[in-house]
């Protein structure tokens, strides 16, 4: 905080601060279930505090009359055509007004479920919240969901407005019932409402004027409650967190630009940049037009030159060496998910934390909670508008704090295809694994591809359908974002195995080479699909042994010889029968069927799709068990 | 108030705007700042210079309708030198040849032809993916719904029904295919904030805002459709005192806003700022 370093006498400081306090705008979000009267309330608040521009109300009245609608205070805000037609607030609207005490920005957030992302946008920028509950309808889904989100977003000051008291004959009993029920719900979230104020927004009761119809209410009016809200705590007393926004080299100077998110920074400070851990010292601030500040506190944008030139890039967080952020690739987080598509494990998202932007996967879903009932949901993915606790793993190390240590560096957004779909707070950090300077480990590769590697070994007679099934399996895996590659026996014969024939020795060598190639792809983190007749059990056993450090799934594609011969896609059986191919498996050479394959496909009994599903199910099971190796 | 006092209202607004400028410059390939030469625009220039340590690292664009007040052209040339601006000027010559003008056409048509059309043409020509605008939430109800970073389609349309969420200082990081992102550093400012900041920082500004013969301009656009309001405020202190008391909306003197019930929304959906 700057005033602490001021040269002014103490008295002047205090006076300055008081004046500054008064000018600071209080941001208040108005939330609640759809149709519980938020827009009407805000319209009425503006009207009753005499904050509307001249002629505004007449203009809206005129518009309503022209369209044969009854005038509503909500129309003052719901200025867009669509909203007037649908009667719902689509996006957050900000309205500025002042009471005698100070200036406000009221954020009117939509209550409709479709627009939760807009409610989040509105609430995230607020210091305090007003939550409306319809006295007649009582506590509804969104009343609960919004409170849950407020607790996640970090809005701690809350006043509940029990609205439409006129519709319940201003009954204190009805009010008390709602207050008791909802206060208990808030308590389970760790929230407390400062007040529950009974109001009738439509008639302006208990907003600015006390209601004569509710003499039993002795608490504050809405404007009195607003004026009692306090601004958030100043974070200048916390350890320094200065995320680097950019490096400017517009002239001879090399300027590190960034906003101080917590703490304060001064010339002469030693800094450490994380991740990376390089150190330097603040030489100057390059403020234009000058003179430069002596200190930049929380919220201030700084232009820093360093004494020692070190490599610094956007995303790094500058801190004082005595109090650094954590650095890691794994943490437990509570996430709210707003995306149309569900949040799924092992899919790559962009994680944005301050100016850091890294790829991340949800390694594990620990808990999914329905935000309105607080009941847990059993599912493998997180549906839109719900809340979950997960393990997040990033591909590169990130600098962060735990949310309870420093909220602003303890939270992040998740992005997919350039759009933000969710946000989360960091609950605790996980132990770092396998992060070494040089060698890239298998676990790191798995973390990046989002799954363990595996080998699917398809064996069966020529024409049994190995390639057909393997190609479809490959397609499904590929489309699901998996790293996958098919090693086809026929393809190998055109290049790598060009020197081999069909003798027993050559077949054994062919199987050995195929398993070696499959092993390389698996080492690279891929799921490799081998399609090879591999007629001899002994050869296949060797392949399995050679690949024992990977998940190995033998898929026996089992079709009766006569069926294969009938199909004879490549005309090989015909040739073999005519004796044009020697040692042809099934005709002139034996096929030893696997005794206990992981997957046994009877192609004469299953459709292709069923076969593909069988293979994918088996793979899924194995990958899940393997996932624990690199997840925890 | 001292420059070192970081906790006051104006400094908070200023520092947030600087952050928005910097995030835009870091995120987008090619940034441009349209410049109307009005008060908000001039505050933007000032904030950009603060954000980038004195020198604005991207071009400014003036869409010249040819209906600017003569004082504005003078101001443009002066300000260009003071701020060291790399200025691109564009005029829709074709529309002017076709005789589009306020004498013969309605303000919505003229605004579209002389502002929006050349503006879109310039975007196509230079392929900017981010445009910095001086929009404030207090100006108009449709603007109250804006985001700091607001994506626009290739046609310049604003999909206000499906805007990206924006929280914890994380903004939309990419423009839609072929489109751009509007960057709006003044979103949280009010008209009064703008004036108090101009006074505090002593920012160069056109004199048309100050009263002559009992009338002054509160908002500046094309001269045939921009009308002065009655006001004795002949200097910046008086303007600020007046604003503290007034209840007349800022854009009341701008004719194109008031043609139909939703004319502002129509203009904006078509790409007007």
Image (cartoon, coloured by chain):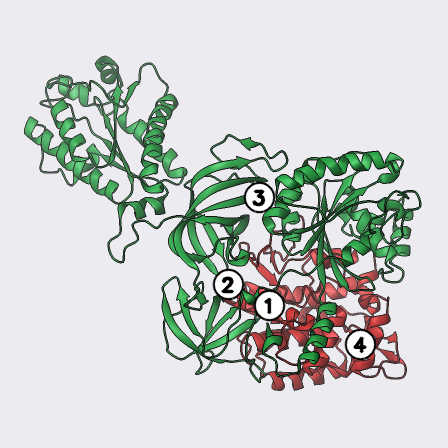
Chain colours: A green, B red
Indicate which label's residue lies in the foreground, 2 or 4: 4
Pointer 3 and pointer 4: residues touching (CB < 8 Å)? no
- Give me the C-alpha separation between circle 3 and circle 1: 36 Å
| Cα gap from disc 2 to disc 1, whole angstroms | 21 Å
- How packed mark 4 is, by other alpha carbons closer than 10 Å (few <14, some 14-19, many 20 or more), is some
Q: Between residue B273 and residue A28, name the one nearer to us.
A: A28
Between the C-alphas of marks 3 and 4, the distance is 43 Å
Say the numbered circle drawn on residue B27.
2
The residue tagged 3 is A338
Q: x and y percent of residue A49 in the render?
A: 86, 58
Quarter of the rendering containing residue B129: bottom right
Callout 3 environment at 10 Å: few (<14), some (14 to 19), or many (20+)?
Answer: many
Query: Callout 3: residue from which chain?
Result: A
Under tag 3, what secondary structure?
loop
- Looking at the rendered structure, whether the residues under marks 2 and 4 are on a common chain is answered as yes
Q: State yes or no: discs 4 and 1 in contact (Cβ < 8 Å).
A: no
Name the residue that disc number 4 marks. Answer: B240
Front residue of A111 and A165: A165
Q: Which mark is residue A401?
A: none
How dense is the environment of label 2, judged by Cα within 10 Å: few (below 14), some, or many (20 and up)?
Answer: some
Location of mark 1 (residue): B122
Chain for mark 1? B
> How much space separates mark 2 and mark 4, taking CA atoms?
36 Å
* Above or below: residue B186 compared with residue B262: below
Answer with the quarter of the image where residue A472 lies.
top left
Q: Are marks 2 and 1 on the same chain?
A: yes
**Which residue is depicted at the point 24% across and 36% down?**
A550
Image position, residue B100 (x, y; %): 75, 68
């Amino acid at each position: 905080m700057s005033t602490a370093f001021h040269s002014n006498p103490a008295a002047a400081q205090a006076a300055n601060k008081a004046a500054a306090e008064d000018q600071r705008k209080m941001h208040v979000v108005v939330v609640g279930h759809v149709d519980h009267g938020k827009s009407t309330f805000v319209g009425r608040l503006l009207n009753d505090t005499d904050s509307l521009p001249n002629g505004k109300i007449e203009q809206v009245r005129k518009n309503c009359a022209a369209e044969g609608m009854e005038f509503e205070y909500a129309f003052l805000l719901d200025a867009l055509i669509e909203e007037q037609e649908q009667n719902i607030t689509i996006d957050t609207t900000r309205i500025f007004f002042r009471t005698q005490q100070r200036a406000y920005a009221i954020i009117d957030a939509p209550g409709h479920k479709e627009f939760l992302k807009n409610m989040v946008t509105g609430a995230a920028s607020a210091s305090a919240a007003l939550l409306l509950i319809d006295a007649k309808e009582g506590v509804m889904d969104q009343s609960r969901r919004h409170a849950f989100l407020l607790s996640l977003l970090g809005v701690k000051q809350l006043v509940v407005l029990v609205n439409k008291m006129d519709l319940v004959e201003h009954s204190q009993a009805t009010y008390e019932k709602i207050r008791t029920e909802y206060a208990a719900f808030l308590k389970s979230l760790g929230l407390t409402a400062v007040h529950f104020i009974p109001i009738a927004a439509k008639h302006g009761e208990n907003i600015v004027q006390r209601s004569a119809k509710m003499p039993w209410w002795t608490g504050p009016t809405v404007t009195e409650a607003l004026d009692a809200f306090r601004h958030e705590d100043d974070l200048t007393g916390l350890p320094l967190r200065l995320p680097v926004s950019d490096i400017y080299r517009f002239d001879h100077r090399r300027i590190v630009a960034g906003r101080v998110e917590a703490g304060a920074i001064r010339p002469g400070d030693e800094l450490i940049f994380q991740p990376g851990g390089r150190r330097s010292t603040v030489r100057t601030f390059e403020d234009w037009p000058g003179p430069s500040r002596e200190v930049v506190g929380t919220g201030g944008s700084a232009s820093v030159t360093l004494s020692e030139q070190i490599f610094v890039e956007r995303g790094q967080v500058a801190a004082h060496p005595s109090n650094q952020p954590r650095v890691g690739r794994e943490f437990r987080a509570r996430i709210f998910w707003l995306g149309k598509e569900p949040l799924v494990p092992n899919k790559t998202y962009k994680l944005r934390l301050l100016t850091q932007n890294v790829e991340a996967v949800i390694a594990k879903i620990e808990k999914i909670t329905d935000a309105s009932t607080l009941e847990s949901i059993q599912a493998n993915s997180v549906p839109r508008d719900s809340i979950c606790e997960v393990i997040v793993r990033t591909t590169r190390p990130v600098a962060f704090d735990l949310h309870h240590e420093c909220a602003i560096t303890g939270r992040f957004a998740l992005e997919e295809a350039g759009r933000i779909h969710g946000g989360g707070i960091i609950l605790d950090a996980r132990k770092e694994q396998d992060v070494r300077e040089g060698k890239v480990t298998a676990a790191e590769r798995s973390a990046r591809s989002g799954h363990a590697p595996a080998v699917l070994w398809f064996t069966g007679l020529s024409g049994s359908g190995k390639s057909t099934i393997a190609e479809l399996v490959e397609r499904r895996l590929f489309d699901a974002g998996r790293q996958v590659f098919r090693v086809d026996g026929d393809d190998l014969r055109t290049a790598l195995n060009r020197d081999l024939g069909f003798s027993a020795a050559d077949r054994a060598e062919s199987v050995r080479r195929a398993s070696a190639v499959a092993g390389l792809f698996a080492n690279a983190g891929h799921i490799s699909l081998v399609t090879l007749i591999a007629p001899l059990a002994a050869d296949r056993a060797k392949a399995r042994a050679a690949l024992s450090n990977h998940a190995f799934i033998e898929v026996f594609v089992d079709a009766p010889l006569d069926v294969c011969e009938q199909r004879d896609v490549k005309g090989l059986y015909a040739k073999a029968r005519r004796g044009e191919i020697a040692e042809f498996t099934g005709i002139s050479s034996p096929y030893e069927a696997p005794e206990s394959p992981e997957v046994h496909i009877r192609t004469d009994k299953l459709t292709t799709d069923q076969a593909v599903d069988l293979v994918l199910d088996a793979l899924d099971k194995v990958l899940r068990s393997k996932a624990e190796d690199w997840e925890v | 108030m001292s420059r070192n006092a970081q906790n006051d209202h104006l400094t908070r607004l200023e520092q947030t705007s600087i952050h928005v400028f910097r995030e835009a410059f870091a995120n987008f390939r090619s940034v441009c700042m349209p410049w109307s030469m009005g008060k908000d625009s001039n505050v933007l220039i000032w904030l950009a210079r603060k954000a980038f340590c004195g020198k604005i690292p991207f071009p400014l664009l003036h869409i010249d309708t040819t209906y600017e007040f003569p004082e504005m052209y003078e101001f443009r040339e002066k300000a260009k030198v003071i701020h060291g601006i790399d200025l691109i000027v564009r005029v829709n010559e074709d529309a002017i040849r076709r005789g589009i003008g306020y004498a013969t056409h309605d303000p919505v048509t003229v605004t579209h032809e002389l502002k929006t059309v050349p503006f879109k043409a310039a975007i196509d020509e230079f392929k900017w993916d981010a445009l910095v605008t001086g929009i404030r939430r207090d100006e108009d109800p449709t603007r109250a719904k804006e985001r700091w970073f607001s994506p626009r389609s290739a046609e310049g349309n604003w999909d206000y029904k499906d805007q990206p969420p924006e929280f914890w200082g994380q903004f939309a990081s990419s423009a839609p295919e072929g489109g751009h992102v509007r960057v709006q550093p003044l979103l949280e400012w009010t008209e009064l904030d703008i004036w108090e900041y101009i006074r505090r920082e002593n920012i160069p500004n056109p004199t048309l805002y100050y009263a002559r013969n009992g009338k002054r301009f509160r908002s500046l656009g094309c001269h045939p459709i921009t009308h002065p309001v009655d006001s004795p405020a002949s200097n910046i202190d008086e303007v600020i005192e007046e604003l503290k008391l007034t209840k007349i909306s800022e854009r009341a003197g701008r004719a194109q806003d008031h043609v139909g019930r939703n004319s502002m929304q129509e203009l904006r959906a078509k790409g007007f700022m």
